[in-house]
Amino acid sequence: MEPDKVITIFLKWLHENPGIFTPTAWKNLPQLKEEIAESADDELFPIAFTISKWCGKNGLGEKLRESLLRKDFDDAGEPTPSTTPPLTNITQTLRTSIEDSYKKLQ
């Protein structure tokens, strides 16, 4: 599991494919937000593991694995600012994305 790819796929789901989340998963997004807040920005593996574990508990584990195998992310060489969000300040980026997506659903 490559942590940056897990994070990128999850962010892509939030922004471009929110329909992938079940109603239960939407309900549990605030829990994920809090779990991510406990991670340090420079520790991508624990953040990706938290996302993977949450996906597994919320019926998205298989979809995450399939997306990783199909490479449902920009894999055309080095990421550029225009194609991929930077993986800096990732805990805040994820928390904000989760919160914004959750609020849109309300």
Image (cartoon, rainbow, N blue to C red):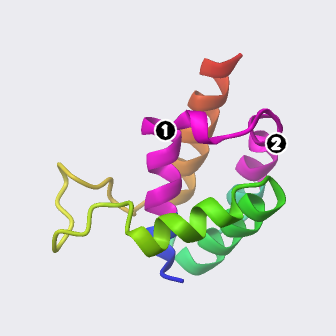
- For the residues labelled 1 and 2, the Cα–Cα distance comes to 17 Å
Looking at this view, name the residue that lies furthest to the top.
106
Instruction: Pick the residue in front: 90 or 103.
Output: 103
Give the crowd class for mark 1: few <14, some 14-19, many >=20 residues within 10 Å.
few
Residue 96: which quarter of the image?
A: top right
- Quick check: 74 above or below 96? below
Q: Is residue 53 left or right of residue 70?
A: right
Residue ID for mark 2: 28
Task: Answer whether residue 74 is magenta in the image.
Answer: no
Element type at mark 2: helix
User: x, y (%) of residue 63?
Assistant: 61, 60
Residue ID for mark 1: 17
User: x, y (%) of residue 47?
Assistant: 62, 69
User: x, y (%) of residue 99?
Assistant: 63, 33
Element type at mark 1: loop
Identity of the residue drawn at 41% across and 69% down: 70
Residue 101: which quarter of the image?
A: top right
Give the crowd class for mark 2: few <14, some 14-19, many >=20 residues within 10 Å.
some
**Which stretch did the figure color magenta?**
7-34
Q: Amino acid at mark 1?
A: Asn
